[in-house]
Image (cartoon, rainbow, N blue to C red):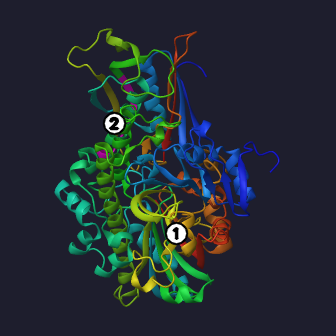
Amino acid sequence: MRPNSYKIIGHPSDTGIKVYAKTLESLFEICAIAMFAIICDISAVKQDKVKKIIIREKKMLFPDILLVSWLERLLYIHETEKMLFSGFKIKKLQTALPCRDLPLYNENTPCNKIYPGNTGCIDSKTAGSIIIAEVFGQQVDFRLHELYIAIKATTYHKLKVQREIKTGYWKAGVIFDV
Amino acid sequence: MAEMKYSNIRKINDFKWEIICDKSAGMKVPGIIFADEEILENAVKEKTIVQVINVANLPGILNASYAMPDIHFGYGFCIGGVAATDAEDGVISPGGVGFDIACGVRLLRTNIEASEIKPVLQELTSSLYTAVPKGVGKSGRIKLSSKEIKKIFKEGVNWGVKNGYGWEEDKYFTEEEGCMHGGNPDYVSRLAINRGSDQVGSLGSGNHFIEIQKVSQIYNEKAACAMGIHKGQVLVMIHSGSRGLGHQVCSDYLKIMQGSLYMNKIKLPDRQLACAPLKSDEGRRYFSAMVCAVNFAMVNRHCLAHWVRNVFESFFSKSAEKLGMSTLYDVSHNIAKIENHLISNNTRKDVCVHRKGATRAFGPGAPQVPQIYKEIGQPVIVPGDMGRYSFIMTGTQTAMHESFGSTCHGAGRLMSRSKAKKVIDPVKLKNMLFDSKGIIIFAQSLAGLAEEAPDAYKDVEKVVEIAQSAKISDKVAKLEPLSVIKG
């Protein structure tokens, strides 16, 4: 895969995405693009409305769990406010980076550092994880938009966020329940 | 079977296989798969049996990790998975219920014959299509405050009856008499309630549908008679669940339980199996929130049935009562319930039965079965695909001691959704089903229609035959679609 790209993958009963990005922020942004590409033709989604999203988690979460929170929040807004999005800008991302690739993540998994996101500093207001983002899109217009499928949720099954040692680029794999 | 990768699979009989308990794989009990050789080979090829093995890792799991004949690859649990955990010291897993909590099927009778309905079928289906809220991103016809939603959580189908939707007697033919107890609205998040506020009485999308069907074959006259069905009769099948509300409940608690796994000293091979002891705070809260979502799902199908009856009433200028549109049965296939079962050492125990894409199939005499079905066993509704057929079965005594009173729930996917979209032309499919079988299809999304094509599913008849041969349910009738509404 080329950096900053995504692939939609078939899963026997559901559907998923693979994303490759240069930074963790881009990874989160492209995951969101890929998710909305499953829902609709994102090229038909105008970016007339901007919405600020703030996700604050009390605990310092690893990036994969935080990615689920991010995608779930977007799904929630999509469903309750009938919005479609095609542009995403992560302004701040604060997450934990594990010491090593552990099979089981939890609050007590040792982490060696906090990833301070593109602001380069740790938010002193909270000990937990943060996402601050702006998302761009429009209200669903059923005359213009065909919604292909409803994504019920983001699963933890085969969920992966990893950093390549050689390039420092990021990879993600997410399966959605549809 | 020579190429089978797992040498630790033992044949019990032609339709039942055991994955021998391998402690090194973390298994606490063996796996039991109800399948023929072909389905088993497929499960091995697709690595679905790994999911059966993973479920056997759950703390407090009893007897075995089961897979029904419609086994196929899911996430965490396989689809068609059944696991019972000790209610005292076992766990509950939101992934073992799934995101669409209490997704299920309601079947309505009519006293209309297929021959009478055929000339007006196009118009009738079109009216139904207009009346029933469906499709991705669409709201229902009812918008409720959070206070009303919380009443649904506590009252279930009784809420519907009180508010003028459906009939009082519907609840007696709904699992749990239309109201599962033990729900606590305080444990359902604001996000979940918001997602559900405009979704009561809406079909949704994906594999959810309303079908007008005819009874094409009767296999068991006594059971058919008890169910009030005969060959040629028109029935209406409704398949839907707890919509966004249920999805949010599952997501909320999966996240909470990801965090509590370490605290509870639970190690799992798949994070989607995240669980907590039933008696822990997280476990109790999830169970209460899940019960609320179950009641919401039952009310959703109850209201959908109400719209269906309304359309039939205005179309035929007769009351739904005169059209004989009573509920045959309503049963969920994504649920966790506390039930009392016989376990391996010949003692009875309260257990938490997780059914993920599996249907409760209680046998004759079970107290939970409505009086009119006591002699034949609980009706089991097994939807197939839109081009072939569905089945009505009954629960059996064998199911009670072989599968914690469970059987299959449908056909099971054969093709991924993305592959189906690539290889199936939805317009051709729609025309082909009309030209060859006269089946009328109304669909909100053409892409969604391709994903739900008959070729994307296994033949449900084969699944049902295996369930019958394994004696975990008995065939009563075959139903063929006359017209289909897809979300």
Q: Position of residue B449 (x, y in %)?
A: 55, 57
Q: Position of residue B313 (x, y in %)?
A: 36, 83
Of residues A57 and B239, the one drawn nearer to the viewer in this rendering: A57
Residue at the spot x=68%, y=66% of the render?
A: B462
Residue shown at the point (58%, 66%) measured from the top left: B386
Q: Is residue B164 something that shows in the picture?
A: no
Numbered range of the magenta stretch: A80-89
The residue most toward the right is B2
Q: Chain of mark 1?
A: B
The secondary structure making up most of the magenta span is strand
| Farthest left residue in view | B147
Mark 2 lies on residue: A73
Q: Amino acid at mark 1?
A: Met
Q: Residue at x 23, y 20 (%)?
A: A126
Q: Residue at x 32, y 81 (%)?
A: B169
Cα distance in 3D space between marks 1 and 2: 42 Å
Q: Does dot 1 land on a helix, a strand or a loop?
A: helix
The residue where tag 1 is placed is B400
Q: Looking at this view, is B190 or B430 the one in front?
A: B190
Is B100 drawn above or below residue A18 in the view shown? below
- Chain letter of the residue beneath label 2 in the structure image: A
Q: Is residue B336 left or right of residue A48?
A: right
Horizontal and vertical percent position of residue B25: 60, 38
Give the class, few, some or many, for how many residues have Cα within 10 Å of label 2's Cα (few <14, many ≥20).
Answer: some
Which is nearer the eye, B146 or A140?
B146
* Callout 2 secondary element: helix
